[in-house]
Image (cartoon, rainbow, N blue to C red):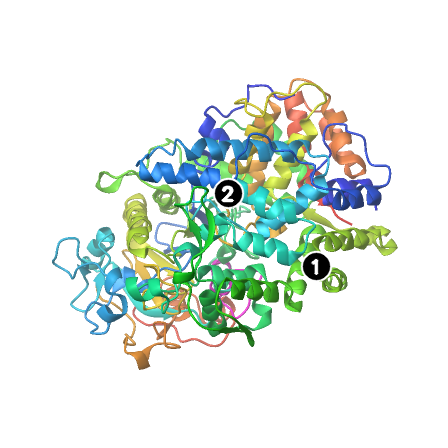
Amino acid sequence: MLRHSLLIRRRSALLGLAASWALGRSSLALAGTSDGDDDPRLVVVILRGALDGMAAVTPYGDPSLTTLRRDLLPPEPGRDGGLLDLGGFFGLHPSLSGMQRLYAAGQMLPFHAVAGHYRSRSHFEAQDYMESGADQRLSSGWLNRAVSALPKNRHGAEGAGLSLGLSVPLLLRGPTTVASYAPEGGRRPDADLYSQIAALNAKDPVTGPAFRNGLTALGFSAKVLAGDAPPPAPRGQKPGAFAILADAAGRMLADRRGPRVAALEMGGWDTHASQKGRLAGPLRQLDMGMDAIRLALGPAWDRTVVLVMTEFGRTVRMNGTGGTDHGTATAAFLLGGAVAGGRVAGTWPGLQATQLFEHRDLAPTTDLRAVASGVLRDHLRLGPSALTNVFPGPAVTPENGLVKV
Amino acid sequence: MEESSAITGFGWGRRGDEPLPDTPVTWLRAQTLAPDAAIFTGLGESADGLIALRTQRREKIRDNSLVKPVFQAEVVAQMEQLLISEQPFRERLAWFWFNHFTVSLRQGDTRAVIGAYMREAIRPNVTARFSDMTLAVMRHPAMLMYLDNTSSTGPSSPVGLKAHRGLNENLARECLELHTVSPQAGYTQTDVTAFAAVLTGWTVNMNAERPGFQFRANAHEPGEKTIMGQTFPEGEEGGVAALQFLATHPTTYRHLATKLVGHFVSDAPPPADVAHVAAALHDTQGDLGAAALALIELCRAPRRRSVGERTDKFRTPMDFAVAAMRALDRAGPRPSPDAPHSPAHTLAGALGALGQPLWTAPLPNGWSDRAADWSAPADMMARADWAYRISAGVHEGNPLDIAHATLGPALRPATIEAIRHAGSRQAGLTLLFSSPEFQRRQTC
């Protein structure tokens, strides 16, 4: 019989729907162990649910824009609550003020009219393909294969990486071991019982490696995250789940023997209805998360690139319910001290009827893999054969000039 | 079929030391033929939840104080049902179909009706025709709210013309992709748009005395529409006919069979098994009871008996927590499910702690049931940590007896040895629930 020495103290926590899911829609995974302080750091953020790129980076200079989505648009730059100008044609969503400051400092590079090489309007297919980096769902993600190509960790420990959150995204799954870390939730077994559990599972092909890596991660994170310092609260706002994870990622990546590569996920982007109201919150969370990771990285921010990507964009026209439906091209972002930013990259396809993809979507002009492989080549220094392995599908030419040299 | 397959593969794990079925196949079959024995007392209908929601909105009540009790009562009652059910196969089918037709708290303000959705749209149809379940789901306020159909308006309808409103494709797209024919059917964007037009006007009337489904004719897109080459008339009947067409499409049967075999047999569904279940659906015009019997048949086949062909499924967090809680359940008086530390509350908390919070799937495709999605290091650590915490509250019973009762022949000598040497009841039970064999359902 269960008695009331059970851990859960509050009724709301017991119900498991709010408090116990403190991390909500966000989770984080890390991989790769650093050899020293000079190593480049890479963070990939997956926005699940399809971010409306035209709401995040609005082409207010395009004459067709107002006819297509008048009721979705914030005022033009300079007006109260208006867009944050990015050089006269594009404006950043008003919730992204931290990212605009990075842009002004030359540390943010928005890309427009980006899409994966697939043309699916299914979230599930598109996310699988985006994370696989291929025309089909593979059993490993492109970021895992990129980590495989990094110089081997000279400390030799298994489970060189760490992940935060309760699951590892496909993006970072694969042959290279990735451990994961979920924020602590109460009392735990002691070291002896943990080692018995690991021994009991040692020969199991699924649970054996999972427990081994979980324990490695526990030891690692206990050391790096010691002190339990609360994450920073930019602009006096309460940090959301995403900012908390971004802060943890930043602190671990900052450690000189910490991981090099991290993946974070964030949901809340599938804005089929009332988009104008619904999108501000997730964008603000994203903005605070970018602030948190920058602050947590400290000097390592200068050696960091953050890639923010989503599975596809949304219809250029507002739908019948104040939202947008599944589309094609969208925006992507590179952020970090290593980024050659301060401009909007990509080729704007235009919004006239003949310029739209299938008469409804922003037409793609940049392959997301070209952005990612430009970063992998120039920032992580992956060679041509490694890149072919990372993106095994149809050939893609990496984008030039994304990072500072 | 072995007992452990019937109990863990088709059910939710053995409850305490309840008697084992004499003939597993007969026991499972009886569950699909008998009516649902679950009794939910003190729960209202979806209309009652909607009234609570409506009152909150009208009176600007911001603390959710009217909807919250409705929701909590649903959670407790449905968790309790998982723990005590004597029809665990039927119970597993109900949760399988809920997940197939996922509604989640993450979108659409569904908290007031999500519990009622399970009881009203899913449970009564677990052994009915798939088209009956589909229609019940698509007319239920929870689904209409979750996938944004309540405001989808025909652009040429009176409301559309007057208020400049239009389509919302969400429900139509997910119904095609996830609920019925799947992308295998090769439908196009035009079909999605046409289906969305068919479903315009399918909404929730919040102002009725008993709020609920309403076909709002003046928001419905006029004219015939064509989906995948089939033409459907204007009006509510067009939607009913389109759903009937989609729910009975041969591609739908293959899609459902693949998911069922994936859930009840293996992460890699054997094509012959899929064909067997798809044929059962096809021959009965989508009878889900017949599909359930076909799944049982798969595990009767003699070829399954050979050791090399045994299959199992990795337990999802929900499978894991329910099985552990059932294993710890003992005959005798139990606390009221509403008590703060009742097993039902503990189970709901566990689902959150283990990464699968109740009715909170991230996206409309529901929760995965595949090993790769639940066996990351943090998943395993969360299971061990939760097992340790829950075991701290167990003050009677020998861990080894509990291990034998719950795992039967699947219990390995190494686990017996580890439990035997454990320093405490808490450690012994933690080892049991962290063992590799407890992470699996024996399928067939």
Q: Pick whichever, A154 or B357, lies toward us.
A: B357
- In reply to whether residue A144 is colored magenta, the answer given is yes
Task: Provide residue B364's location: percent of width, then percent of height.
Answer: 50, 54
Badge 1 element: loop
Quadrant (top left/top right/bottom left/bottom right) for the N terminus of chain A: top right
What residue do we see at 34% from left, 65% from top? Answer: B158
* Horizontal side, residue B166 vs residue B11: left or right: left
Q: Amino acid at mark 1?
A: Pro
Q: What is the x, y in percent for residue B329?
A: 68, 26
Q: Quadrant of the C terminus of chain A?
A: bottom left
The count of marks equals 2
Residue A118 at least partly seen: no
Q: Which residues are magenta?
A: A127-147
Which label sits in the foreground, 2 or 1? 2
- Which residue is at 37% across, 66% downward? B157
Residue B328 is labelled as: none
To which residue does mark 1 refer?
B269
Residue type at numbered disc 2: Ile
